[in-house]
Image (tube, rainbow, N blue to C red):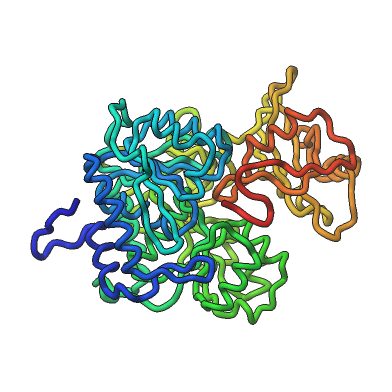
């Protein structure tokens, strides 16, 4: 499944990745559970998967379902599908058996790739047989490899998922505010994003494929765009990857001490966990930049925190802080997510009329990128934001997360920030639930700080009355051990809402540990 490039033409993404994989096949490429897998092993797995798909008659543009979790074999499977110019249909392997089976039956992919552990889920081979798809199992032990599953060696009659020309990944959004939906990440967009990031990293140096020093820590889930971009960027640049199946703060600490990376990428929940762990500053002294958001991290460890903003449909980041902007504007622009990346245009429009707004007016953010402009033009997001006169972007909330309480529009983030000022509160999630009189009312799930004085609902009511206006005050509270999260560690608003819809009024002292298929405060999948 390769195409010959004309002499002198720049390498496309597939050729670039193959070139990196072939530089030194014996050199270590991916670490997982204290074991290194070589570039050659990764390349061999990719070739075997490509050959199995081709032998089954599954050609270019075919949509291949991959049950993704952070393991080297599944990284190889994902890259194999992309570099063979097929499309990855992302499937979150960490979900209940019935939900997983239902999703796969609905996708009707001509091939399904999963880890040996996931193929052991009850009823999964039977679903694949009903769909008529090729079944491929990947594994790390006794060595990195794959096999076509007995009974699932041939492509059935279908119907199967339609081909997706030019699409690298069709993936689910995070499901932060509602049910996840699928969006297409085009191959050209992914290629341009990875190439741009590599040029920025090399600071104008050689763009030739080479193996570089340093190790990229990879707690970001492959089933999320951040994980795809981070893993793809590491492979594109020829950097080794240390892969964590899920974020664990103690394991992350040990890997930082072992590999001494200069850059770390952490979502806000992970930043908070690192701060709570109170690691000695010298243990994190190798870090020069943290890509995340947390003023307290800078204060404790003296490491610049460079915020980025992006979305699945834009193949990663569209705005962010550079080190130069940080040095010049960090204090004055605290809270901004930075300025537009190269090749990206941003504008703010009125939510109702679509009229472009003046600087510092709040409206819906629209984005236009080089890889999307010819096909889509301006793409409207669901984020409420403002652009200041210097081009810095300030995200203030989500239009689809706003609560309409009897005509008053409430932004949950504003209420959460106020409640989190209470000395006993570690984290808050505010969502809207239906109300027969007002339409919607805010409710709050609250996580308390460890070792902090215990508080009850009466204290929360008192604090809110003192610091919030009447219509902003939540009507109910639940004190929980942890907030339910999506695979990308964002708080899942639908799951928080279910805490209130399914259980009636909580007692003042009740603590609830939400049951989720993603993460708690100590891990994420």
**In the image as oriented, which residue stretches furthest toward the left?**
7
Q: Give above or below for 180 relative to 326.
A: above
**Which quadrant of the structure image shows residue 380?**
top left
Left or right placement of residue 171 versus residue 123 in this view: left
* Residue for point 55% across, 78% down: 258
Instruction: Say which residue appears at 25% left-offset and 63% top-offset.
Output: 18
Foreground residue among 241 and 391 = 241
Along the horizontal axis of the image, is 118 left or right of 46?
right
Nearer to us in this view, 74 or 402: 74
Picture mark count: 0
- Which residue reaches farthest bottom? 282
Q: Farthest residue in the top direction?
A: 436
Q: Does any portion of residue 318 appear in the rendered image?
A: no
Seen in the picture, residue 349 relative to 312 is either above or below; the reply is above
> Residue 128, image x and y in percent?
41, 34
Q: Residue drawn 34% across and 48% down?
A: 369
Quadrant housing residue 210: bottom left
The residue nearer to you, when weighing 356 against 120, is 120
Residue 489 in sight from this viewpoint: yes
Residue at 40% from the left image edge and 62% from the top image edge? 144
Which residue is outermost to the front? 150
Q: Nearer the viewer, residue 16 or 390?
A: 16
- Where is residue 35 drawn, in percent x and y? 49, 70
Position of residue 146 measured from the top left corner of the image (x, y, whole percent) = 37, 54
């Amino acid at each position: 499944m390769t195409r010959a490039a004309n002499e002198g033409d720049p390498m496309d993404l597939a050729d670039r990745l193959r070139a990196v994989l072939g530089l030194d096949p014996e050199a270590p490429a991916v670490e997982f559970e204290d074991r290194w897998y070589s570039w050659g092993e990764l390349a061999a797995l990719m070739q075997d998967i490509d050959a199995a798909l081709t032998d089954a008659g599954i050609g270019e543009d075919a949509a291949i379902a991959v049950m993704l979790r952070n393991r080297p074999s599944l990284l190889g499977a994902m890259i194999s599908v992309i570099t063979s110019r097929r499309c990855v249909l992302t499937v979150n392997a960490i979900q209940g058996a019935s939900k997983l089976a239902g999703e796969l039956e609905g996708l009707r992919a001509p091939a399904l790739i999963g880890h040996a552990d996931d193929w052991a889920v009850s009823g999964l081979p039977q679903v694949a047989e009903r769909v008529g798809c090729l079944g491929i199992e990947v594994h790390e032990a006794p060595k990195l490899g794959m096999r076509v599953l007995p009974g699932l060696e041939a492509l059935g009659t279908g119907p199967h998922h339609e081909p997706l020309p030019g699409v690298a990944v069709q993936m689910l959004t995070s499901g932060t505010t509602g049910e996840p939906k699928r969006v297409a990440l085009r191959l050209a967009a992914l290629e341009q994003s990875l190439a741009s990031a590599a040029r920025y990293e090399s600071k104008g140096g050689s763009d030739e494929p080479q193996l570089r020093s340093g190790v990229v820590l990879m707690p970001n889930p492959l089933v999320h765009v951040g994980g795809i971009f981070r893993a793809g960027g590491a492979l594109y640049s020829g950097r080794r990857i240390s892969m964590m199946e899920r974020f664990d703060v103690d394991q992350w600490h040990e890997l930082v001490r072992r590999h001494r990376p200069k850059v770390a990428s952490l979502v806000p929940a992970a930043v908070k966990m690192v701060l709570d762990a109170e690691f000695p500053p010298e243990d994190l002294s190798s870090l020069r930049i943290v890509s995340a958001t947390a003023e307290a991290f800078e204060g404790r460890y003296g490491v610049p925190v460079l915020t980025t903003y992006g979305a699945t449909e834009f193949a990663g980041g569209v705005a962010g802080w550079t080190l130069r902007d940080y040095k010049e504007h960090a204090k004055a622009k605290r809270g901004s997510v930075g300025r537009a990346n190269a090749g990206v245009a941003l504008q703010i429009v009125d939510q109702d009329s679509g009229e472009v707004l003046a600087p510092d007016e709040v409206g819906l953010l629209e984005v236009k990128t080089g890889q999307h402009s010819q096909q889509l033009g301006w793409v409207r997001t669901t984020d409420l934001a403002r652009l200041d006169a210097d081009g810095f972007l300030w995200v203030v909330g989500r239009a689809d997360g706003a609560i309409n309480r009897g005509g008053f529009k409430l932004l949950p983030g504003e209420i959460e920030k106020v409640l989190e000022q209470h000395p006993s509160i570690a984290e808050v999630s505010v969502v809207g639930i239906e109300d027969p009189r007002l339409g919607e009312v805010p409710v709050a799930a609250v996580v308390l700080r460890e070792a902090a004085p215990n508080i009850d609902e009466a204290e929360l009511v008192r604090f809110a009355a003192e610091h919030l206006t009447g219509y902003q005050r939540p009507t109910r509270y639940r004190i929980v051990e942890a907030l339910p999260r999506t695979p990308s560690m964002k708080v899942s608003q639908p799951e928080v809402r279910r805490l209130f819809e399914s259980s009636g009024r909580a007692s003042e002292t009740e603590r609830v540990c939400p049951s989720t298929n993603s993460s708690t405060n100590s891990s994420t999948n």
